[in-house]
Amino acid sequence: MIRIWEQLQFLRPGWTDLVEILIVAFLMYRILVVIQRTRAMQILLGVVLLASVYGLARLLDLILVRTLLEAGFQYGAIAALVVFQPELRAALARLGRNRMIRAFQRLEGTRVVEEVIDATERLARARHGAIIALEQKASLEEYAMTGSAVDAPVSAEMLVTIFTPYSPLHDGAVLIAGDRIRCAGAILPLTQSPVKDRSLGTRHRAALGLSEETDAIVIVVSEESSQVAVAHGGTLERDVSSDRLRAIVSGVVTEERLAAEATVLSAGEDEAFSSR
């Protein structure tokens, strides 16, 4: 019995094993965050399915199936590099936008915020409808593929030009990643949640839909009322001032606080409606 216990001592983890487990778990989490809702996630599920079939073939001793899969797995690493090349580039680019590194990019981030706010104010004064999505942690690659690539530095002049009425790209959304305009004319998913306010148009519903599926901050300018609204975390705040918009985009107002304030605002509106 003592000999068996001694042989099982390797199963008792030490502090280095715990550190390794935490590092691997963090890396796996970051990989899943990068590839979620992308083509890479579907490919990964396909690989898991093939691995399951291979395990079943070994269990049932299916020689032909096992041989074919083993031959395919020999070139799996090279094939993965080719197939996942866009996602690998996006992951490396996102590493450069990590929170620890982002501290050194604060000045550039401040410039982007001011350019977006300046453009929003101009569009609101001109009553030009607009929808601008700011990428956060979750990639917007899936939605960028529905629009036209721009790849230009963020500037108020560029944003105002894109949303000028009758311009080719004014109907869709502009997606901003970091300090660059990634694409324009993108198609966003409409929210599937019931919306009480019937006055909300397609832009507002699209902003809510994207904020429900990702952590993006979506700014909407209404061409009917010239009001500015912000969607984040599945909530929509309307009639947002420039100072309030600056606080939300800069991260001063967190997603949890925005959701709590939206809940209070919604409760107040419901109470006012019921008292009429």
Image: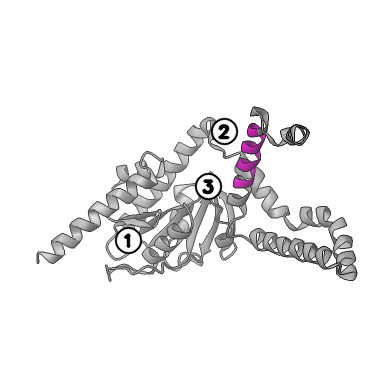
Callout 1: SS = loop
The residue lying toward the viewer, choosing from 59 and 196, is 59
> Which residue is pictured at 39% across the width and 65% down the height?
203
Callout 3: SS = loop
Quadrant of the rendering where the C terminus is positioned: bottom left
**Is residue 245 among the parts visible in the rendering?**
no
The three-letter code of the residue at mark 3 reads Lys
> Which residue is pictured at 58% across the width and 62% down the height?
148
- Compared across the picture, whether 175 is left or right of 260 comes to right
Magenta region, residue range: 18-29
Q: Nearer the viewer, mark 3 or mark 1?
A: 3
Is residue 142 one of those drawn in magenta? no
**Is residue 113 among the parts visible in the rendering?**
yes
> Which residue is pictured at 46% across the width and 52% down the height?
216
Pointers 3 and 2 in contact (C-beta within 8 Å): no
Q: Residues within 10 Å of mark 2 (few under 14, many from 20)?
A: few
CA gap, disc 3 and disc 2: 14 Å
Which picture quadrant has residue 25?
Answer: top right
The three-letter code of the residue at mark 2 reads Ile
Give the residue number, with chain letter if any, for mark 1.
127
Residue 137: give its label: 3
The residue lying toward the viewer, choosing from 161 and 173, is 173
Q: Which badge, 1 or 2, is on the more N-terminal residue?
A: 2
Pointers 3 and 1 in contact (C-beta within 8 Å): no
Residue 128, horizontal then vertical, whole percent = 36, 61
Q: Which badge, 3 or 1, is on the more N-terminal residue?
A: 1
Residue 77, horizontal then vertical, whole percent = 81, 53
Residue 214, horizontal then vertical, whole percent = 48, 55
Q: Which badge, 3 or 2, is on the more N-terminal residue?
A: 2
Give the residue number, with chain letter if any, for mark 2.
101
Is residue 19 one of those drawn in magenta? yes
- Compared across the picture, whether 125 is left or right of 60 comes to left
